[in-house]
């Protein structure tokens, strides 16, 4: 299994983030902060128990390694001293939600930051915003979403499905705010949430269901249409395993993606020579133009008939076979070889174990993906789970009325949550609000050219979001602090500067920058050095997309 595959699996499954990180030795007893930290052990929180409260010296926290972030230990070594509080919440007799709250010892910025998870969670997600949040001065928290140690072990326990869907995030927030007040004293403070993938679902869910929990949410590549994104995963898995010859190799996928970019790259507003698409909606790529293998042959640079059939199904996307209604958008052109794409979605060794848990909840542990009826069985899945898991409501009027702000971003080369799904949701919010300008008063969408799922890709895709290890030096390059500024000063962001790092052993040298524009604008190259953000301007692009799901599948 490749490093890229392991990284992708860690992001969407969450299983690589094992709990049990070791705290450093306690500080000397003379430190007054140690006493105030340890006193949190006596804190009484309804439906929750404080398990430990330990003072951790600066740079002495060692998180467990994760494959998607090989530099996690280096990132943790830059953390300031903090009080680490571990809590177990049980809002129902069948719930068991692990929570960690980190409280900065010095230079608290007067704010609380909740952070999200990936995949099925099951452990504390140290590498998805906690470290960088603490370094920015926030009190931070994360939970295991109540699915520890493995989401597949929650079959037959619907209360834990509800915990995963939304309740665990609310419980984390409730508990963390009490811990913050107990440590810093009775005080008012702003609260923010950031998350991507499952964390993006969490962010939208709290804004929709618990509008008083946060003042601002930073939402990335959200899996909020949860039952239907998993239907899409199942559609792709079945297409790529229809016959033993249907699977597309990494080399095949690289060949396909290169052909797409050769056909459309730099012609959609991007710069000449771009290795990614700026607006995939403008690409008219015909898979029939790909090189076909000779009968009886196969290879990296050609496709067999079964492989071409599988690719056509990926580009078609999940549809109801009886009515033709669209269930979920298809694979985005230009995302074929990205992490969490067909290479992983077709892998029978890992994909069913990591992504088919909703089907096991609804149909039992012996669920057979080949037997799934995308008409009637999907209705049954929705009947059991959509109200627990999905965060599809476009009505966030309660959140808006209390001054809440939303920044939503998604990668234009995301093969797991196609950008057209995110655009569809945002357009539904606009329709409910009645006007784009009125919507942008509290909710803005940013489409990121060249970014895969949550981070990475060939574009300028680092902008201070979760999963990012970089701490942007400029305010316009930091999405989280842009959200803070919007909430607290009213300065709405029209664009964010994305950066691509690399070029030396540290990977911190800036290679390129490009604006990430507020929808419906996209960056257009106007000449000069394509690595400089000043050589692009944000221009109006088309609204929406042709692949929006049927209203039947937006429940």
Image: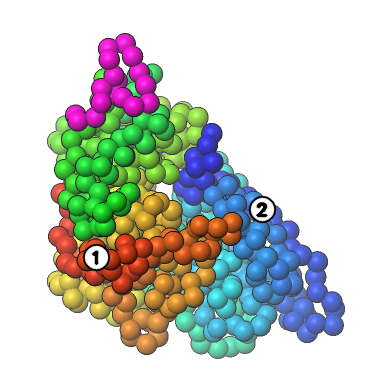
Q: Nearer the viewer, residue 328 or 483?
A: 483
Above or below, comparing residue 386 to residue 502 in the picture: above
Q: Earlier in the sequence, mark 1 or mark 2?
A: 2
Q: Which residues are magenta?
A: 288-304
Q: CA distance from mark 1 to mark 2?
A: 46 Å
Q: Where's the N terminus, which quadrant? A: top right
Residue occupying the far right of the picture: 29
Q: Which mark is residue 527?
A: 1
Q: Is residue 489 left or right of residue 189?
A: left
> Main SS of the magenta segment?
loop
Above or below, comparing residue 287 to residue 195 in the picture: above
Q: Which mark is residue 64?
A: 2
Q: What residue sits 56% from the left and 53% below the top?
A: 69
Give yes or no for residue 302 being in the magenta stretch: yes
Disc 2 secondary structure class: loop
Above or below, comparing residue 97 to residue 238 in the picture: below
Q: What residue sits 33% from the left and 49% below the top?
A: 275
């Amino acid at each position: 299994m490749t490093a890229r595959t392991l990284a992708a699996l860690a992001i969407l499954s969450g299983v690589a983030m094992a709990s049990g990180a070791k705290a450093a030795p306690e500080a000397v007893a003379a430190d007054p902060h140690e006493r105030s930290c340890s006193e949190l052990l006596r804190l009484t929180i309804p439906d929750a128990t404080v398990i430990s409260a330990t003072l951790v010296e600066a740079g002495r926290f060692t998180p467990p390694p994760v494959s998607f972030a090989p530099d996690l230990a280096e990132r943790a070594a830059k953390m300031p001293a903090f009080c680490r509080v571990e809590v177990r919440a049980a809002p129902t007799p069948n719930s068991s939600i692990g929570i960690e709250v980190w409280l900065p010892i010095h230079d608290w910025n007067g704010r609380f930051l909740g952070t999200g998870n990936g995949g099925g969670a099951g452990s504390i997600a140290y590498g998805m915003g906690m470290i960088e949040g603490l370094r920015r001065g926030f009190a931070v928290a994360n939970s295991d979403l109540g699915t520890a140690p493995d989401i597949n072990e929650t079959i037959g326990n619907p209360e834990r499905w509800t915990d995963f869907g939304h309740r665990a995030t609310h419980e984390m927030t409730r508990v963390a705010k009490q811990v913050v007040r107990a440590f810093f004293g009775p005080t008012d403070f702003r609260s923010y949430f950031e998350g991507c993938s499952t964390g993006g679902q969490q962010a939208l869910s709290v804004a929709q269901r618990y509008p008083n929990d946060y003042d601002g949410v930073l939402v990335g590549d959200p899996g909020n249409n949860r039952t239907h994104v998993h239907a899409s995963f199942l559609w792709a898995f079945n297409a790529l395993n229809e016959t033993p010859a249907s699977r597309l190799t990494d080399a095949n996928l690289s060949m396909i993606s290169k052909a797409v970019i050769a056909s459309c790259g730099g012609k959609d507003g991007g710069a000449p020579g771009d290795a990614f698409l700026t607006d995939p909606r403008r690409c008219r790529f015909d898979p029939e133009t790909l090189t076909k293998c000779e009968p009886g042959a196969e290879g990296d640079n050609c496709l067999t008939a079964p492989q071409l059939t599988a690719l056509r199904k990926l580009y078609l996307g999940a549809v109801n076979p009886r009515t033709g209604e669209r269930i979920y958008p298809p694979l985005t052109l230009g995302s074929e070889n990205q992490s969490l794409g067909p290479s992983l979605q077709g892998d029978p060794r890992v994909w069913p174990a990591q992504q088919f848990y909703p089907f096991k909840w609804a149909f039992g542990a012996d669920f057979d993906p080949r037997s799934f009826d995308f008409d009637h069985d999907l209705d049954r899945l929705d009947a059991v789970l959509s109200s627990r898991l999905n965060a599809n409501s476009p009505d966030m009027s309660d959140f808006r009325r209390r001054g809440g702000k939303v920044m939503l971003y998604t990668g234009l080369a995301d093969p797991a949550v196609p950008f057209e799904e995110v655009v569809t949701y945002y357009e539904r919010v606009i329709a409910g609000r009645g006007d784009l300008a009125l919507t942008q008063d509290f909710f803005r969408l940013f489409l990121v050219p060249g970014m895969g799922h949550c981070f990475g890709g060939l574009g300028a895709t680092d902008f201070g979001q979760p999963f990012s290890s970089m701490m942007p030096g400029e305010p316009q390059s930091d999405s989280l602090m842009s959200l803070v500024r919007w909430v607290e000063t009213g300065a709405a962001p029209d664009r964010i500067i994305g950066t691509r790092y690399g070029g030396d052993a540290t990977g911190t040298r800036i290679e390129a920058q490009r604006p990430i524009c507020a929808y419906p604008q996209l960056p257009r190259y106007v000449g000069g050095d394509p690595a400089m953000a000043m050589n692009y301007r944000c221009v109006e692009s088309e609204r929406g997309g042709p692949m929006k799901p049927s209203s039947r599948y937006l429940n």
